Image (cartoon, rainbow, N blue to C red):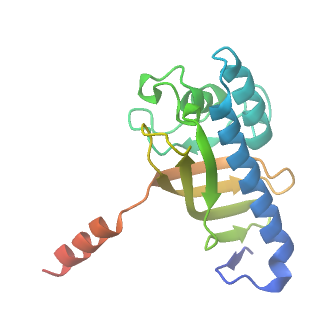
Amino acid sequence: MATQLPKPHPEKFEGLVKKIRKAQERWAKGVAKIGKTNDTEQYGKVANRVLDKLYDFEEENGFILFKPTLASQHPVRTDRQGTASYFIGGIFTEDGAGFARTPWARVTFEDDFYFTELDSGDILVMGRCTFYPYEGDTDHEITTADYTFGYRGGSMRIFLHHSSNMVSRRRQVKFELKRFV
């Protein structure tokens, strides 16, 4: 049976919360590291090292479930090549130069996330993350996305990554008002 833990987290789950936070921090640093890479030839090398550390491609042709925030023509990716394309560009033109090539200064995860630990030891986490551009970067805005990550319990590498644009409060209120009219 799975254990569902809404905030606030009971003290007995403190270790699991620390494990999740460490995995989130590793992911945030990995995305920022890709964006800080200045040498065009190094993007691929850096991104592949980051993907190896963060995602559970069990073998060269490993399989994950990946639904990136900004992908619409190819909204689901299941392999390393499609995942890498989203982060650094490549096989899908909709990915452009790649989301992670934006030099994000930092990525944060909000404290009020929800998670469940499955009988297998795998962990599912849902919440919101925010990407901050460097100060003075006028080409990019602060970007917030809702996410679901599935982590392999032992390695804390991602096997499920689903993210979507955050529903703005204004849009949500308009929808609620429309529902009752």
Image side of residue 41 versus residue 140, left or right: right
Residue at position x 29%, y 68% from top? 170
Looking at the image, can residue 164 be seen? Answer: yes
Q: Residue furthest left?
A: 181
The one nearer the camera, 54 or 30, is: 30
Q: Residue furthest front?
A: 136
State which quadrant residue 77 falls in.
top right
Query: Is 78 placed left or right of 96 in the picture?
Result: right
At horizontal 75% and vertical 42% (from top left) the residue drawn is 54
Residue at 68% across / 84% down in the picture? 8
Q: Which quadrant would residue 150 be assigned to in this image? A: bottom right
Nearest the viewer among 74 and 24 is: 24
Q: Position of residue 73 (x, y in %)?
A: 38, 33
**Quarter of the rendering occupied by the C terminus:** bottom left
Residue at image position (75%, 62%) is 21
- Work out which quarter of the rendered image holds the N terminus and state it: bottom right
Q: For residue 148, what is the image quadrant?
A: bottom right
